[in-house]
């Protein structure tokens, strides 16, 4: 092992540790890797920044725009809701149709987006059918991952391993090269989920949407305070009272002359005799009630109805992958000032967080219980940072543009499948046409792109170049062949499957694909076999993220709404992972002989 190989492997090891620890954002880690490879002289400037001009990266961001157009014009909603409607109220039929629906959608659009589009609908259907959503949401997330492996554009790892083939001077995959193997895996996995997997899913009651305060254990934190004569609060607005800033008390409403005003504006004035509906710990209230001239009203009983009025409501929202404020605290974000809503509690890791909400750092997949004016809540359905866990109307979808958007999408598929245009060219052409015909505005197109994923992929692609240039990929391939080579190429393929599956559970599946693909190509070269079987196996294994909720963003999105526990995924995901390994061992060499 040369010094250069050792340095590359050291950089790679540190990157994997940082990815797994989540102490830094994955895109930041990726850029750090890029800069380290450049500054240490392992890569030239052109090589280090080549990822940003890679056709694979261009295809990824263009597909995000096309996916957003299908959503914005209502096509994705229409397909999802129509197919789900025929499933009825049978649990196994619901799981079957949910997985088929999201799988088909994920074959041609961003699988995270497909999950997000169907999430509110699946929750609503589960509640109407009185089936625990814990039985439905893991199948939704898993179905999106399974559908993604059926086409080249279904998921970034497929594109990235194909790009690795092209980089090595080999023929890349075409749009439907993944389809035979992908369909076998998807259909077999759906059968497993319907017959076996659903019995391994937790059977937990749905959160009662009519009693959210009770479900989130808020009763100890909600109190009504009576403003006494002579209180220093009298005459001040809610903001001027500084109750939140000084005493960590949030005013959610005012009861005056027997009439409740909920979701009050910050400039509402406080009067003597007002009842202030506040959120805060009992300790704070006992400490400050004399200081601010208020009395407790213990005889009043709080219920969800106390928080609901024609003007205000309580609802649940999930932080989506589009949020630009992940890892920031509620206070840093000034959530109430930015969105006009009060965060009452956060559901994370099987239980609610109620105490000092302002100090909590928000994470992808957190379910927030929020309270505020109905117009503010309704506005969130158009904010891509959130998913509303209640049925909403899509009246602002550009339904009149749906035929054009569908035609453009079909044109893109035809051009790629016929080999007329490279997938990157066709995807960019389709995204530009979507904007030109009005399916999507340009600002919306920028917002649709998962920039974190783009920078992650662009930053990690140079690592593949470095592994090939320094011989690190060859070195690792030699080790794998030394361990498993005596058992033949199929054993090497199994080793690559397992390696990629393990890595992808703790870091981005795109990064896992970029790292293992050069090793697979080098191993195939040493053995003198067609590398495409190895590389396709790596691409599929990179999407084989079924063991833990942290394995893929689609799984993270359903974690809170499904009221799941960490190892719920493992119970149902481990047999599924073993099934997929078995299917690849049997069928992959048939389609791509070794």
Image (tube, rainbow, N blue to C red):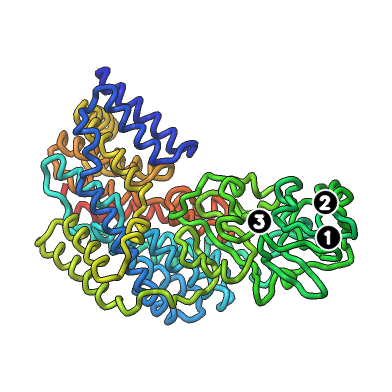
Quote the CA–CA distance across marks 1 and 3. Answer: 20 Å
Quote the CA–CA distance across marks 3 and 2. Answer: 18 Å
Q: Is residue 323 left or right of residue 402?
A: right
Q: Which residue is mark 3?
A: 345
The residue at the far left in this view is 420
Task: Specify which label sits upstream in the sequence, 1 or 3.
Answer: 1
Q: Where is residue 576, by image quadrant?
A: bottom left
Q: Which residue appears at 44% of the width and 63% of the height? A: 116
Quote the CA–CA distance across marks 1 and 2. Answer: 9 Å
Q: Which residue is mark 1?
A: 225
Q: Which residue appears at 49% of the width and 51% of the height? A: 549
Q: Which residue is mark 2?
A: 285
Do residues under tags 3 and 2 come within 8 Å of each other at their CB atoms? no
Residue 502 spot, x, y in % from top left: 39, 42
Task: Specify which label sits upstream in the sequence, 1 or 2.
Answer: 1
Local secondary structure at mark 1: strand
């Amino acid at each position: 092992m040369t010094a250069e190989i050792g340095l590359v492997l050291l950089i790679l090891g540190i990157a994997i540790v940082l990815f797994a620890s989540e102490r830094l954002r994955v895109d930041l880690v990726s850029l750090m890797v890029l800069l380290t490879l450049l500054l240490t002289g392992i890569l030239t400037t052109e090589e280090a920044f080549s990822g940003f001009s890679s056709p694979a990266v261009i295809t990824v961001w263009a597909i995000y725009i096309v996916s957003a157009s299908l959503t914005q014009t209502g096509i994705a909603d229409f397909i999802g809701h129509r197919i789900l409607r025929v499933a009825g109220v049978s649990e196994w039929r619901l799981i079957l149709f949910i997985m088929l629906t999201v799988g088909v959608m994920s074959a041609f659009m961003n699988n995270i987006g497909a999950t997000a589009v169907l999430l509110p609908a699946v929750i609503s259907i589960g509640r109407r059918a009185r089936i625990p959503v814990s039985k439905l949401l893991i199948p939704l997330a898993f179905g999106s991952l399974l559908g993604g492996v059926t086409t080249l554009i279904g998921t970034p790892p497929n594109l990235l391993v194909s790009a690795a083939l092209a980089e090595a001077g080999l023929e890349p995959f075409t749009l439907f090269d993944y389809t035979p193997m992908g369909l076998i895996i998807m259909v077999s996995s759906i059968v497993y989920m319907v017959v076996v997997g659903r019995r391994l899913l937790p059977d937990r009651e749905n959160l009662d949407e009519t009693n959210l305060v009770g479900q989130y254990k808020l009763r100890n934190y909600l109190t009504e305070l009576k403003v006494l004569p002579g209180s220093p609060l009298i005459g001040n607005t809610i903001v001027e009272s500084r109750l939140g800033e000084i005493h960590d008390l949030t005013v959610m409403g005012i009861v005056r002359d027997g009439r409740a005003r909920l979701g009050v504006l910050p400039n509402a004035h406080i009067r003597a005799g007002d009842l202030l509906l506040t959120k805060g710990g009992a300790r704070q209230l006992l400490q400050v009630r004399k200081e601010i001239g208020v009395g407790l009203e213990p005889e009043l009983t709080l219920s969800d109805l106390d928080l609901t009025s024609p003007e205000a409501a309580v609802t649940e929202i999930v932080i989506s992958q589009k949020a630009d404020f992940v890892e920031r605290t509620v206070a840093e974000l000034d959530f109430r000032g930015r969105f006009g809503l009060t965060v009452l509690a956060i559901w994370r890791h099987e239980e609610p967080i109620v105490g000092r909400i302002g100090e909590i750092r928000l994470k992808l997949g957190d379910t927030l219980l929020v309270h505020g004016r109905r117009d503010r809540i309704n506005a969130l359905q158009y904010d891509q940072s959130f998913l509303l866990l209640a049925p909403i109307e899509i009246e602002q979808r550009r339904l009149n543009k749906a035929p054009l958007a569908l035609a453009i999408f079909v044109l893109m598929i035809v051009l790629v499948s016929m080999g007329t245009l490279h997938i990157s060219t066709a995807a960019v052409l389709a995204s530009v046409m979507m904007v030109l015909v009005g399916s999507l505005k340009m600002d919306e197109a920028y917002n649709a792109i998962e920039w974190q994923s783009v920078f992650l992929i662009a930053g990690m692609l140079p690592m593949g170049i470095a592994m090939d240039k320094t011989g690190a990929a060859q070195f690792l391939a030699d080790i794998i062949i030394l361990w498993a080579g005596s058992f033949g190429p199929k054993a090497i393929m199994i080793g690559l499957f397992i390696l990629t599956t393990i890595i992808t559970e703790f870091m981005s599946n795109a990064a896992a694909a970029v790292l293992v693909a050069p090793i697979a190509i080098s191993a195939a070269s040493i053995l003198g076999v067609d590398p495409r079987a190895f590389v396709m196996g790596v691409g599929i294994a990179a999407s084989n993220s079924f063991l833990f909720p942290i394995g893929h963003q689609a799984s993270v999105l359903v974690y809170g709404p499904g009221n799941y526990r960490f190892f719920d995924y493992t119970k149902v995901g481990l047999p599924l992972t073993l099934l997929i390994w078995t299917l690849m061992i049997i069928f992959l060499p048939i389609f791509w002989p070794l």
